[in-house]
Image: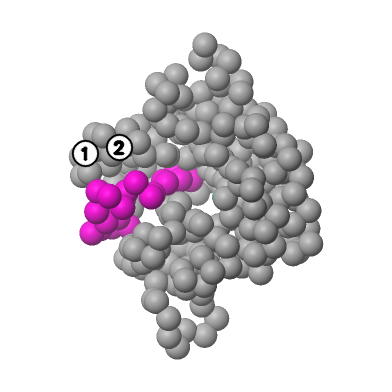
Amino acid sequence: VIAESVRPTVIIGNWKMHKTIAESAAFVTSLAFVVRHSSTQVGLAVPYTMITAAADAARGALIAIGAQNVFDAEEGPYTGEISCRMLKDAGASFVIIGHSERRHLFHEDNAWINRKVKRALNDGLRVVLCIGETLEQHQTGKTHAVLHEQLTECLKDVGERQIESLIIAYEPVWAIGTNQTATPEIAQASHHFIRNEIAKKWGKPASERLIIQYGGSVKPENAAALLNEPDIDGLLVGGASLVLDAFVKIIQCHKIKTQSAT
Ligand code: PEP
């Protein structure tokens, strides 16, 4: 209820390595029609090849198009990499950084993620920073220690003004793509911890404005209960964002939240 009045709800789909240019344009066109009266902020992080087509289809609609990764240099001899300038030029307004698949499959560590975060914020992209503990860390009670370390290292030297362009996605690794959604209580506890950590470093007003999304096997069936938690301001949705009907149902959960709050 408190979150409702202070922070908008932000739902972002992460398509990972799925779909074609034509499919992305058709999806965004349909989605734009459905969300035209929604107060929920909606974004899609699409593969690089689809950014322009998706951004064109989203023009005039309240859908932000973003990327799933970026390199930390401005430009140069980095074969196969992509810069913030290129992403913005293609039509992206935000970028996901530090997704667990990047951390585990492509060996991105907190220091590298920190360089990417600073580069993207400096270059005018909104950043969705993903953090979260593994199953082993979860089971051995290390969640808060891991979140503290990730926040400290990934946000090193990020200024108070830049925090305004940041979204944090709490994505417990054990919940991503596993159908093992965190319970609303477990997610809320982590979100509350994250907000307190941000308050300690950047002050309470900044922490109160910060959007913290939950990610990990979000489905139409569990989205409303998650969004009803006071510190869960939005959702980062993988698999379910590939299916228009499921993604729309998740976006519409916001309405349930609004109704239950009044
Ligand atoms: C994700 O990739 O960020 C994610 C949360 O995936 P899924 O919803 O499929 O678990």
Residue depicted at x 52% and y 85%: 79
Look at label 2 and name its amino acid: Ser
Tag 2 residue: 207
Give the image location of residue 147, x and y in percent.
34, 46
- Which type of secondary structure does the marked residue at label 2 adopt? helix
Look at label 1 and name its amino acid: Gly
Tag 1 residue: 203
Quadrant for residue 2, please give it.
top left
Image quadrant where one finds the N terminus: top left
Quadrant for residue 35, please give it.
top right
Mark 2 crowd level (few <14, some 14–19, many ≥20, 10 Å Cα): many
> Which residue is more in the foreground, 232 or 40?
40
Residue at the limit of the structure toward the front, as seen here = 60
Give the image location of residue 63, x and y in percent.
61, 47
Residue depicted at x 39% and y 72%: 72
Mark 1 near ligand 1 (CB under 8 Å)? Answer: no
> Which residue is more in the foreground, 136 or 208?
208
Mark 1 crowd level (few <14, some 14–19, many ≥20, 10 Å Cα): few
Answer left or right for 113 relative to 158.
Answer: right
